[in-house]
Amino acid sequence: MTDRIRILATSDVHGYIYPHSYADGSSKDIGLAKIKSLVNILRDENTLVLDNGDVLEGSPLMYHHFVKTPDEVSPITRAMADLNYDYINVGNHDFNYGEEALMMHLQNVSAPCITSNFFYHGKPFGPNYVIRQVAGKKIAIFGIVTQYIPNWEKKSHIKHMRFVDAYLSAEATVKLIKRLENPDYIICLYHGGFERDLVNGRLTEDETGENEGYKILRNIRGIDVMISGHQHRTEAGKLYDTYYTQTATNGAELACIDIYPDNNTIEPRILKADIDADPDMLKLFEKDEATCQAWLDQTLGTTNVDLRVTDEFDARLHKSQVITFLNKVQQEKTGADLSSNALFLGATGFGRDITMRDLVSTYVYPNTTVVKKITGKILREYLEKTAEFWMIHNE
């Protein structure tokens, strides 16, 4: 249909360009090179291509970049510029390498950032909203990011930034758009997820403000499409008169929302990246990838103990040798009485020769070690929360 408006959206790409695992080299249906192939097929003159944040952190390629060449434009920034997005939002992990890294990304990504609910050096960072005419229709688009970022991020990484409540910002922005613009459609890019079950409305987590997607859908009238993220879930549907999407992580999926003004219908769907990767994008980053792969194969040390993870479920149930090792390292470095570490999904553990590849495949994220003083009561609550992993829910 000639009047069809199409929205294509990525979220939580986390620095993945190439379609393979950095742990073992196996092929995977992930990465921006595969997403580009999908976009090339689906894009036409009535299409907007959007990104919903969390691109700078997550892959060994990006970790290598920020360790070795932080003053250069990053591979994922150049890949996004090559894909030619129309607008982008930022996510909480885009602040992980500090303000300068984020600003370099935004200055070179070749798409306007429309995140509206944080201030930089005392001034609003992005516009309240943007207006685009597509297929003869007026579309208002705005972006918001979870305001929970200061609870995670190093203060030095966000020292000139102030975050505003995402829900209140969305509420005010929608009112402003309605009053000033009277658009045909309002689209919200929200780097946050859902705090309640989308079917029965029950709370699925503490209401900290990290995720407010359900609250936005339920209470703010006038948003036609909300593109969510942060939780890495596969979601597409309609709730309280608003259509919503969310995609899996690492460029495994692309959200496609088709809007048909003639019969006033909206069709959201999630497309898998099970397609050949774009050869031009792969070629564009051959040197970056080869340098990263050589770095990953460096031997960092050796051990006489087998620290490999062969069964994640068993490792969580009976304690993992590699997590015990990491906890002992943390205790020795910090002098803490106790140490806690996560066994991440897909963790490989360490063989006798420990390489950088083993390290980044076992401890996936460049997190910050923190020492806190706690009471026995808090420790007990922590252990009870951890034990909830083993609870069986019959619903």
Image (cartoon, rainbow, N blue to C red):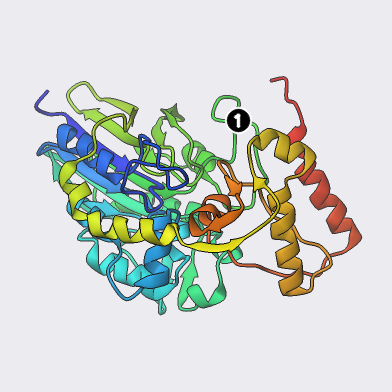
Quadrant of the rendered structure where residue 187 is?
A: top left
Seen in the image, is 72 located left or right of residue 283? right
Which residue is the extreme one toward the front?
304
Which residue is the extreme one toward the right?
376
Mark 1 Cα shell of 10 Å, populated few (<14), some (14-19), many (≥20): few
Tell me if residue 158 can be seen: no
Seen in the image, is 75 located left or right of residue 227? left
Seen in the image, is 45 located left or right of residue 154? left
Q: Nearer the viewer, residue 360 or 179?
A: 360
Provide residue 123's location: percent of width, then percent of height. 37, 75
Q: Nearer the viewer, residue 302 or 247?
A: 302
Provide residue 174's location: percent of width, then percent of height. 37, 49
Q: Residue at x 68, y 46 (%)?
A: 206
Specify the amino acid type for callout 1: Gly
Provide residue 271's location: percent of width, then percent of height. 32, 29
Q: The residue tagged with tag 1: helix, strand or loop?
A: loop
Q: Nearer the viewer, residue 169 or 289?
A: 289
Q: Nearer the viewer, residue 80 or 181?
A: 80
Residue beneath disc 1: 201
Q: Residue at x 57, y 56 (%)?
A: 353
Tell me if residue 121 can be seen: yes
Q: Residue at x 9, y 27 (%)?
A: 2
